[in-house]
Amino acid sequence: MNSATINSILRFVALVLLQTLVLNHVNFLGYINPYPYILFIMLFPVGNNSTWFVFLAFLLGFCVDLFTDSGGIHAAACVTIAFVRPAILKFSFGTIYDYQSIKFHQTDLGSRLGYFATIILIHHLILFSLEVFNITNIILILKKTLFSSIFTILLCTIISILFSPKRK
Amino acid sequence: MQQIVNFIIRNKTALLFLLLFGISLFLTIQSHAYHKSKFISSANFLTGGLYNTTHGIGQYFNLKDKNRQLVKENQRLRNLVFNLKLDTLNTLAIDSTLLGEYYRFTSAEVLKNSYSLSNNYLTINRGKKDGIKQDFGVITSNGIVGIVDNSSKNYATVLSVLSIKSRINAQLKKTNHIGSLVWDTKSPELVQLVDISKFAPVAVGDTIMTGGQSAIFPKGILIGKVENFSLDVGGDTYTINVRLFNDMTNIGHVYLIENFNASEIKALQNKADE
């Protein structure tokens, strides 16, 4: 058990609790909730075993589902973004990613924002499609996706700036 | 054989992804079927316990509101009790002499409530230990809340009326035209009453209450009042927007209704269906 593992476990528990006990009850304008628990997936150390990573993402989504009585919608959205994350990393950070040693707090804010936004949009689209589960309500799905995404991107950026290690 | 093993090892992440995605899709589809969300619910030991702890802290914040509600309810019940002799013909109010025989009420506290999803659940602090089972009705002093969906030893989940899955039998208070209560997910204050015959004399402001047709709720539990209404596309039935008496976003204490005759009624209805 090195410090990175303990760090990940703490992050996992803290984000699930924050999400289910606080942020699920925001209900801004009636239906807009932020879902920044996926920061765990977005900031998971690169270069680790990707099979293990997909499984952890499933576990994360499953925990949130357990609390919200929502079947498997969070789990489905989480495994998907965990699976496509390598492609998005390459797309957002370009060559740095090839060294397999990217440090998220060292990347510049612009590309980090792009990375967050892409993953969050994919996650929320899957999440709300499965939640509404009715293709005739496509407008509702897109509306929820858009507004919640803006909220989540804002929160994720703020959290990642606040909790990043101090630059020396 | 070697190649198959190699293929699996090479694509193990993709295969695991497909497997886990399949599992979560299965759970999602299961949760959309009425009364089938058996596997995952927040009525388990871990989440229920955690909600219970946080509720213990949070409940102090709205004690004043809850007290006011209780006093109001007491006042209403006192009015009912002392006017009972004069008004025995009023069968719309729940006949209190029958309560002991047919229905049992249990009180519970709401640990968790949601109203922004398309299927909303409440978690309450009563479970199998208190005799709570699936299909018990859940109400507050203002009106209906939902139906018990799942229960564990100490906790139970309630499928809220704010759910695309629930269909609750309801009727107009002034006539006996019945319909079904559904939700279009748009607003937590409005539910829809569909399949009301076009011959029903509906007017804005009319009271909607539960009909006696289901074995879950007794007849006469208040639901809400008519906000507006329109004829269906077919032109045969009304679709009525009902403004709930309950503020579904703020529910503290609820009552669970057990119908002692539910199994008998259900058995009879099943027989009729065959």
Image (spheres, rainbow, N blue to C red):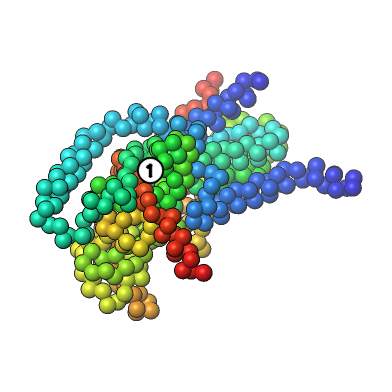
Query: Which residue sits furthest right?
Result: B2
| Residue B52, horizontal then vertical, whole percent | 40, 32
Residue B194 in the image, given as x and y percentages of width and height: 35, 68
Identify which residue is drawn at 62% across, 20% down: A3
Name the foreground residue: A161 vs B236: B236
Residue B217 is drawn in which quadrant?
A: bottom left
> Residue at the spot x=85%, y=48% of the render?
B4
Task: Pick the residue in front: A124 or A146.
Answer: A124
From this viewpoint, is residue A19 visible? no
Q: Amino acid at mark 1?
A: Asn
The C terminus of chain A: image quadrant: top right
Please, is residue A15 above or below residue B106 in the view? above
Q: Is residue B13 above or below residue B94?
A: above
* In this rendering, position of residue A77 left or right of residue A33: right
Instruction: Tell me the chain of label 1.
Output: B
Residue plotted at (50% across, 37% down): B44
- What is the x, y in percent for residue B56? 35, 29
Above-or-below relation of A27 to B91: above
- The answer to which quarter of the image holds residue B211 is bottom left
For the N terminus of chain A, the quadrant is top right
Mark 1 crowd level (few <14, some 14–19, many ≥20, 10 Å Cα) = many
Observer able to see residue B195: yes
The residue to which callout 1 is attached is B113
Image x and y of residue B157, in percent: 44, 44
Q: Residue at x 68, y 47 (%)?
A: B19
Q: Secondary structure at mark 1?
A: loop
